[in-house]
């Protein structure tokens, strides 16, 4: 008997693209299909202009997702900026006749606490230093001026979108299961602000703490893949 497939839509972090999640499929059960979402201005959409605010990005993501078969089970995952896109995407999906089975968010404070620190206006040197501290960009990119020149506008635009985000509380919280992952040495977040994701859903959230920095997810792919598999198997 063929096991039913559940699609896990993966939304990009700042500066990320569909390639960012290339290794996730190898760490989840065969019943889970990893589907990375591409934003304009990167990879196969490189010729499209970058989007400058989260709501517009979420509209773009929503337009992509609703073109797929949402009669089949699906869930949403986003890291950092991707978590915010997942949150805004879910708000849009709940206005239709479909909803995700589960929400997975990592490396992101709850929506009221997002974008409080201005990074997009840092000088080039300070911007690169900040990226090195985050740990999300490969060293070969950070050490190569031409590659930095290519990626810098994408990153600055994404950071500015986060900085300009204005939280708008929902009339009613989601009634959806939510799993939130965060790291102990992530300078981008704090545990109190992460725990505030509880205000966005009526169901009790699952919190998982890991050692590491902002991009801890790539150090724990087997564990996170197992978490996705076990959670979705019971959803």
Image: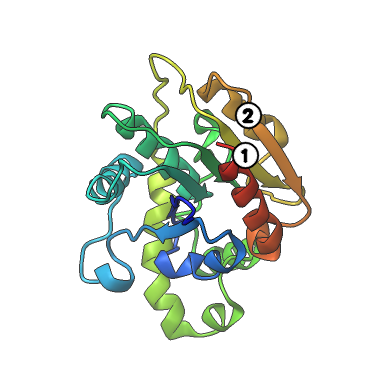
The answer to whether the residue labelled 2 contacts the one labelled 1, judged by CB atoms less than 8 Å apart, is: yes
Q: Is residue 207 visible?
A: yes
Q: Secondary structure at mark 1?
A: strand
Dot 1 corresponds to which residue? 180
Residue 12 in percent (x, y) is at: 44, 56
Q: Is residue 163 visible?
A: no
Residue 185 in percent (x, y) is at: 75, 51
Does 54 sit left or right of 140 as displayed?
A: left
The foreground one among 232 and 83 is 232
Residue drawn 22% across and 62% down? Answer: 49
Dot 2 corresponds to which residue? 205
Residue 146: name its quadrant. bottom left
Question: Where 164 falls versus 134 (above or below)?
Answer: above
Residue 157 in percent (x, y) is at: 37, 56
Residue drawn 60% across and 79% down? Answer: 139
The foreground one among 58 and 69 is 69
The foreground one among 185 and 128 is 185
């Amino acid at each position: 008997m063929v096991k039913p497939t559940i699609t896990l839509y993966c939304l990009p972090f700042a500066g990320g693209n569909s390639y960012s999640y290339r290794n996730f499929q190898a760490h989840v059960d065969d019943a889970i299909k990893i589907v990375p979402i591409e934003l304009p201005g990167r990879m196969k959409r490189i010729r499209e202009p970058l989007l400058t605010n989260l709501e517009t990005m979420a509209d773009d993501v929503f337009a992509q997702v609703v073109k797929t078969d949402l009669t089949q089970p699906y869930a949403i995952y986003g890291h950092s900026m991707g978590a915010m896109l997942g949150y805004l995407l879910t708000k849009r999906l709940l206005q239709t006749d479909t909803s995700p089975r589960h929400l997975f968010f990592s490396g992101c404070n709850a929506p009221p606490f997002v974008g409080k620190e201005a990074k997009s206006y840092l000088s080039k040197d300070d911007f690169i230093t900040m990226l090195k501290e985050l740990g999300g960009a490969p060293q070969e990119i950070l050490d190569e001026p031409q590659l930095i020149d290519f990626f810098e506008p994408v990153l600055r635009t994404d950071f500015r979108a986060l900085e300009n985000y204005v939280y708008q509380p929902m009339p009613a919280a989601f009634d959806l299961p939510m799993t939130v992952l965060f790291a102990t040495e992530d300078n981008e977040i704090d545990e109190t602000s992460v725990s505030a994701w509880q205000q966005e859903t009526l169901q009790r959230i699952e919190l998982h703490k890991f050692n590491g920095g902002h991009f801890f997810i790539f150090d724990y792919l087997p564990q996170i893949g197992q978490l996705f598999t076990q959670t979705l198997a019971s959803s």
